[in-house]
Image (cartoon, helix red, strand yellow):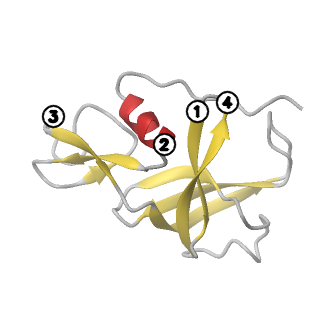
């Protein structure tokens, strides 16, 4: 089976990937309206301010929604979950759930999750597992 695809960092996303490499989830926060947001971009999607900074966040969140894919994809053995996690800071991220069998009985909406990082060659990707 082919290996999992690896994202490419861009100038806008490099601080996010640097945080992942350091074992830290980082998001952008607007200094004008104080909103956190994801995915990265050079301006706040709430107020359009360009006064934004990168900050570490808790890495905790809740399972907002998911689907279980029953077809293999490059680097993934079916079945696996494609999930949306709502972070405690507000933004939502698409991710995978690890550390639990990906079945409807185990993936309960609103379950508490925490970030962990999965190595993909030279990159570390944020994935989520049930909170301890």
Q: Choose between 114 and 65: the one closer to the eye.
A: 114
Q: Position of residue 10 (x, y in %)?
A: 42, 22
Secondary structure of the residue carrying numbered label 2 = helix
Q: Which residue is mark 2?
A: 20
Asked if marks 4 and 3 touch (Cβ < 8 Å), the reply is: no
Mark seen at residue 10: none
Is 8 rendered above or below residue 52? above
Q: Mark 2 vs mark 4: which is more N-terminal?
A: 2
Task: Give how far apart the Cα atoms at labels 4 and 3 are.
Answer: 33 Å
Q: Which residue is mark 4?
A: 121
Task: Give how far apart the Cα atoms at labels 2 and 3 are.
Answer: 23 Å
> Which corner quadrant holds the C terminus?
bottom right
Q: Which residue is mark 3?
A: 50
> Which corner quadrant holds the N terminus?
top right
Task: Give how far apart the Cα atoms at labels 1 and 2 are.
Answer: 8 Å
The residue under the point 39% across, 62% down is 58
Asked if marks 1 and 2 touch (Cβ < 8 Å), the reply is: yes
Q: Mark 1 vs mark 3: which is more N-terminal?
A: 3
Nearer the observer: mark 2 or 3; the answer is 2
Secondary structure of the residue carrying numbered label 4 = loop
Task: Give how far apart the Cα atoms at labels 4 and 1 are.
Answer: 6 Å
């Amino acid at each position: 089976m082919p290996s999992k695809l690896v994202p490419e960092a861009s100038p806008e996303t490099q601080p996010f990937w640097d945080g992942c490499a350091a074992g830290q989830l980082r998001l952008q926060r607007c200094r004008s309206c104080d909103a956190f947001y994801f995915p990265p971009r050079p301006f706040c999607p709430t107020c359009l301010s360009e006064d934004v900074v990168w900050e570490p966040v808790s890495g905790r969140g809740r399972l907002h929604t998911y689907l279980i894919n029953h077809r293999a994809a490059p680097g993934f053995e079916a079945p696996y979950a494609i999930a949306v996690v709502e972070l405690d800071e507000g933004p939502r991220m698409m991710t995978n759930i690890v550390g639990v069998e990906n079945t409807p009985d185990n993936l309960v909406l609103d379950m508490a999750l925490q970030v962990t990082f999965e190595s993909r060659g030279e990159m570390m990707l944020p994935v989520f597992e049930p909170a301890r």
